Amino acid sequence: MPDISIFNDVIGPVMRGPSSSHCAAALRIGRLARDLMDGDLTDVLVEFDREGSLPTTHESQGSDMGLFGGLLGWEPDDERLPDSARALAGAGIGLRIETVDAGDPHPNTYRLTLRNDREEHALIAISTGGGMMEVLSIDGVALRMDGGYDETLIWLDGAPREAVERLAARAQADEVLVHETDAGLLVQMKAAGYVPDDALTELRPRRVRRLGRVLPVPSRHDVRLPFRGSQELLAYEGDRRTPMWRLAAAYEMARSGFTEDEVVAKMVDIVRILRRSIDQGIAGTHYEDRVLGHQSGSFLEAMEAGRLLDGGALNRIVLYVTALMEVKSAMGVIVAAPTAGACAGLPGAVIAMAESLGRSEEDMARAMLAAGLVGVFFTTRWTFAAEVGGCQAEGGAAACMAAAALTTLAGGNRDEALAAASMALQSMLGLICDPIANRVEAPCLGKNVMAAANALACANMALAGFDPLIPLDEVIDAAKAVAERMPREHRCTSLGGLAVTPTSLAIERRLAGRADGGCVGCGCG
């Protein structure tokens, strides 16, 4: 079972692009692929399984943009990312993308063949949701690499085990894996740094490659987590009813080695990024390859003019959710919380409500931490990837996380936060993922608004003592079971739901420049 970090896996990454499972994860895969070639690439072949999600979504949902940026060595929030295809060609790197019958079990599988004038390597990796990824094999050798360590790969003709053990001790490696291959051995060393060249003399390696850590919080050896699920939390806590944000901080302290002050400060930094993005969205954003135009500004005008129904703080929440979604669609900087497609429901609800209540950024950060812990429970048991679970895995996760956050913001206790999270997810089971025109904008905006409104209602219900009946862990398991019966077409493939309506297909054609006339999204001419 992976050691989930709130900042690696749940509230993050800080990124650009429409989809974290496409853009940020693909970028991280590309970064590792670049390191595997020691930064020297002349040709790249990318293969996607015909039955996966990527053949129909890799271009419009940002996989290409992210992967190309990673192959160039860029960060997930690099402002050059929208131009990564041109930059890749300008760097003299040849590229082919093909659809194949590979029978890959995971819908987000990347098969890369990498070449330069001296060598060739093959890498297979998957995007697991929320910007997280995992390398499954290199050159046909099964291994595991999630980007949490600095990894040194050492190809040997053969070596005594004692020599490998001496090297591991000298390198202070957390984990050493020795893989047998037809050509000898592949030694994989995971550590908080690379194995230095002078330590390798005894082994006489044929080749050494150093693949850098791509996650913000490094992996650590022998992590002892206090709990991994809500039921474990209750057993750990007993009747103490510690506030959820403190439990989240305790969890992340155990995972990362940070102090409580450092955990809160890191989340405050994220809150400040989000607030800047909200302001940017309200001021107005533009991007050519986009379904919806700037709408948050007109919502603010209508709200200030008194033309909207009285929704109280909910109207400000809708404004902030819309602003964040517009920034995402304009390739601005957002935070996947827990994903880019569901980036707005949680922070929009928390920041808008906190401002309405006159709360500080530290209060916002504590509420976000409470949400982060619920997200840990969610992704430990299941996934944030819509390609695996539909939008119930993204919007549903955001709703239950936001419900816990708002309950915490209101001073609710641990049990109330868990109750709110359970009720919020219960009402979003079965939610499909069907982006209009193959862009992560609509109905994604409405689903983010729904997640936030649902969270607000469930937070108040929990604070009033409503009974959720089903524990959160069981609701997550139920969502997973629903997803296993959900048709592939309804899991972010753009092959079902609203994505295949005549209007959606017409918008997609117009965006691709294959039809003349009319304005995008209006249905005319």
Image: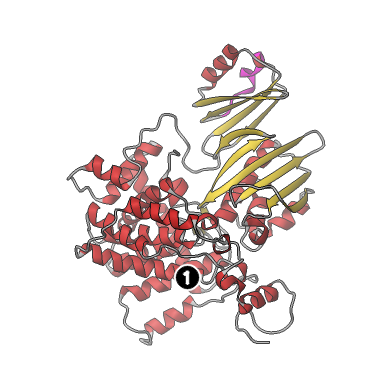
The percent coordinates of residue 65 (x first, y second) are: 65, 56
Q: Quick one: which residue is furthest to the left in this view?
A: 239
Coloring basis for residues: secondary structure
Quarter occupied by the N terminus: top left
Residue 279 appears in the picture as rendered: no
The percent coordinates of residue 326 (x first, y second) are: 52, 69
Q: Quick one: which residue is furthest to the front in this view?
A: 485
Residue at 56% across / 73% down in the picture?
498
Residue 115 appears in the picture as rendered: yes
* Boundaries of the magenta span: 194-202
Q: Is residue 312 left or right of residue 478?
A: left
Residue at 48% across / 37% down in the picture?
218
Residue corresponding to mark 1? 323
Q: Nearer the viewer, residue 450 or 101?
A: 101
The percent coordinates of residue 68 (x first, y second) are: 68, 51
Residue at 78% across / 45% down in the picture?
43
198 is within the stretch colored magenta: yes
> 292 above or below 141?
below
The percent coordinates of residue 192 (x first, y second) are: 51, 31
Q: Nearer the viewer, residue 359 or 340?
A: 340
